[in-house]
Amino acid sequence: MTTDARILILGGTPEARQLALLLQARAPAPDQVILSFAGAVRDLPETSCEIRVGGFGGAEGLADYLLSRKITALVDATHPFAASISANAQAASSATGIPLLRLLRPAWAPMQGDDWTDCANSAAALEALPASCRPFLALGRQELRQIFSKAAHLPALFRSIEPADFPIPEGWRWIEGRPARSMTAELQLLRDAGITHMVTKNSGGDGAYQKIAAARALQIPMLMVSRPAEPAQAVLPDAEATCDALMAIFTTRS
Ligand code: NAP
């Protein structure tokens, strides 16, 4: 990577952090890789690259940032369900001419043994729950804040990294934390809580997959929220492929 290359990674995913590490190893100077977070979660990863936190102020704000920091390539490595920032990245890239790459991990697909129903969005998934059930709402706190009333009558379990910022319905149970990395832990959680249904987003990746495997093993029906539509563009499935594509851009230019 040449000294004039400067890459902004829109992050909030493990893949964004992996890409930052890969690029950092190739960058002559530490300020050539900037990893950006929305600021929704407090514990940020330790990294030697530059970190910035907080929104840019829409597509225009992002375009201004790209120009003022002399960014030469933008990578949208945000979560598949973070639709606003992806649209802003597309608009800012078009407005500035700065190339945009989309790192998007593949979606999960149902496997033999899954009882899986695709739902257009989280609200539709909650509405599809039977009148009497004990669901695990694996949806995230910000999402639930908008729609929790649709499942307020059910004895639901939900898990989030940060505490809920909405009034938790009386029959609900909240547990703090990230998805467990071990299937045994997820099996135990589902069994102990007597879960009969799971509502989850099709996030893809390994980090949150063990709950899917556990639901399959326990034959728990899954209401799977489909990903929002992405702006039309080529996607790169992982950090390695994105790093290679960036190197190809910089090699062509030099
Ligand atoms: P969103 O709806 O697409 O974004 C809302 C606003 O947050 C954006 O318009 C932007 O503000 C700011 N923003 C989002 N990502 C940013 C980033 N990486 N750097 C700086 N500003 C950012 O996104 P969301 O669904 O709220 O998710 C927020 C962040 O959490 C994303 O970075 C995403 O990767 C991560 N995340 C999301 C989910 C999920 O299920 N949605 C799950 C895990 C992690 P401005 O318009 O002011 O620039």
Image (spheres, helix red, strand yellow):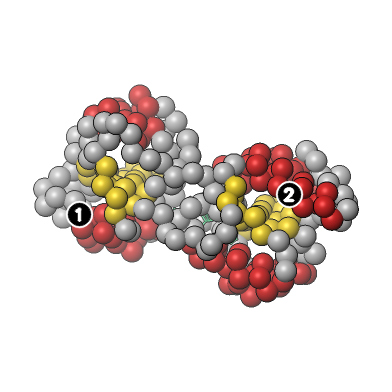
Q: Position of residue 120 (x, y in %)?
A: 32, 58
Q: What residue type is labelled 2?
A: Leu
Q: Residue at x 27, y 27 (%)?
A: 217
Q: Is the residue indicated by label 1 positioned so its CB lies within 8 Å of ligand 1?
A: no
Out of 252 and 147, give the one closest to the viewer: 252
Q: Is mark 1 on a helix, strand or loop?
A: loop
Q: How crowded is mark 2: few (under 14 residues within 10 Å), some or many (20 or more)?
A: many
Q: How far apart in space, not on screen, are marks 2 and 1 (Cα)? A: 43 Å
Q: What residue type is labelled 1?
A: Ala
Q: Where is residue 92 in the image (x, y as percent from the top left)?
A: 65, 70
Residue 173 visible within the image: no
| Viewer-side label of 2, 1 | 2
Q: How crowded is mark 1: few (under 14 residues within 10 Å), some or many (20 or more)?
A: few
Labels 2 & 1 near each other (Cβ < 8 A): no
Residue 146 horizontal side relative to residue 97, left or right: left
Q: Residue at x 19, y 34 (%)?
A: 194
Q: Name the residue under label 1.
A: 128
Q: Residue at x 58, y 68 (%)?
A: 88
Q: Residue at x 22, y 32 (%)?
A: 219
Q: Position of residue 116 (x, y in %)?
A: 27, 42
Q: Is mark 2 on a helix, strand or loop?
A: helix
Q: Mark 2 points at which residue?
A: 246
